[in-house]
């Protein structure tokens, strides 16, 4: 596996442990609420827990990074950490499912790996366009069409950013907020990074799994309605969560259910 030359690190170790590491991709909206990786690092004993977060990469100098490259960078950082002993669990919550699966498959070429997809969601045109419109609404009442998602991805993300900047400039001018532009800019960059990640997931070939292929378990409170992008029914195990969970949110109960599953396997 070759090192991916990313601008920023994508992996952060949260806890110590001797074997059976857990890698958790669990991005959240701008919030101080605890993340699943943080909860697991507190509740799971004896196993090192790592947080996968590509937003730092995607808010850097590169506007767009393909999901494959993000996964390669993550897998490479993990292997260089020296913590790859025993069975590896790669946990992906909600829209992080595709990245989780990519990372798990890369590591599975030489190690025993299980991908745990928690309430998985698979970004598509509608989700990217809806998030673009939601973020645009934060800067005013203007409605602008989402850029063509089939164009060059870097140009798509740059076009989204420019639309946001235009609306921020108009807002600042109308309300004399030029002194507050720094806060708006920080928000814009985070929105750009999150949209770039969703776009990378949307663009990722659903059938292009690595040769090693990790075992896959899906934890969902609605398995009968779940669509698993790119996976046949014989390629994963389904485990129904005991209680319904808020869509897209990480709760202490959900983290405990994940910890219980990982601890029993």
Image (cartoon, grey):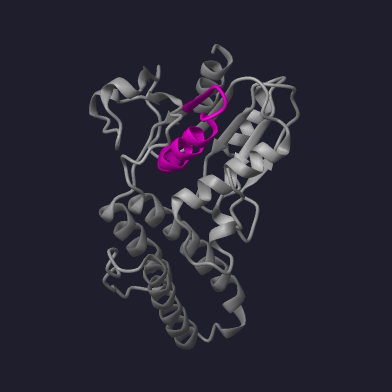
Residue 95 included in the magenta stretch of the image = yes
Q: Nearer the viewer, residue 249 or 117?
A: 117
Residue at left 30%, top 57%?
Answer: 130
Figure check: 262 above or below 248: above
Residue 205 included in the magenta stretch of the image = no
Where is residue 5, by image quadrant? bottom right
Residue at left 38%, top 37%?
Answer: 209
Residue 33 visible in this rendered orientation of the protein: no
Where the C terminus falls, by quadrant? top right
Where is residue 129, by image quadrant? bottom left
Q: Nearer the viewer, residue 87 or 177?
A: 87
Q: Is residue 15 left or right of residue 188?
A: right
Figure check: 46 above or below 94: above
Residue at left 65%, top 44%?
Answer: 77
Q: Which residues are magenta?
A: 92-115
Residue 154 screen position, x and y as percent: 42, 68
Residue 111 screen position, x and y as percent: 57, 25
Q: Is residue 95 left or right of residue 206?
A: right
Q: Residue furthest top?
A: 264
Residue at left 51%, top 17%?
Answer: 261
Q: Is residue 149 left or right of residue 49?
A: left
Residue 214 screen position, x and y as percent: 46, 27
């Amino acid at each position: 596996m070759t090192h991916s030359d990313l601008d920023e690190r994508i992996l952060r170790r949260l806890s110590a442990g001797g074997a059976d590491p857990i890698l958790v991709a669990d991005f959240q909206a701008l919030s101080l609420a605890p993340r699943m990786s943080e909860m697991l690092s507190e509740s799971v004993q004896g196993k090192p827990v790592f947080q996968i977060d590509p937003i730092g990469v995607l808010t850097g100098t590169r506007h767009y990074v393909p999901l494959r490259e993000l996964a390669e960078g993550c897998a490479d950082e993990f292997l260089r950490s020296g913590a790859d002993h025993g069975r590896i669990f790669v946990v992906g919550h909600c829209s992080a499912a595709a990245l989780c699966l990519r990372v798990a498959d890369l590591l599975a070429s030489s190690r025993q790996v299980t991908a745990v997809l928690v309430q998985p969601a698979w970004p598509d045109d509608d989700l990217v366009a809806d998030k673009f419109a939601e973020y645009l609404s934060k800067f005013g009442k203007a409605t602008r069409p989402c850029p063509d998602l089939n164009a060059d991805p870097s140009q798509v993300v740059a076009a989204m950013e420019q639309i946001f900047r235009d609306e921020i400039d108009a807002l600042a001018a109308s309300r004399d907020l030029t002194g507050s532009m720094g806060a708006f800019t920080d928000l814009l960059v985070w929105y750009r990074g999150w949209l770039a990640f969703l776009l990378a997931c949307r663009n990722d070939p659903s059938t292009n799994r690595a040769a090693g292929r990790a075992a896959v378990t899906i934890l969902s409170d609605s398995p009968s309605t779940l669509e698993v992008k790119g996976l046949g029914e014989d390629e994963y195990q389904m485990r129904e969560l005991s209680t319904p969970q808020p869509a897209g949110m990480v709760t202490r109960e959900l983290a405990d259910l994940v910890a219980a599953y990982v601890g029993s396997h």
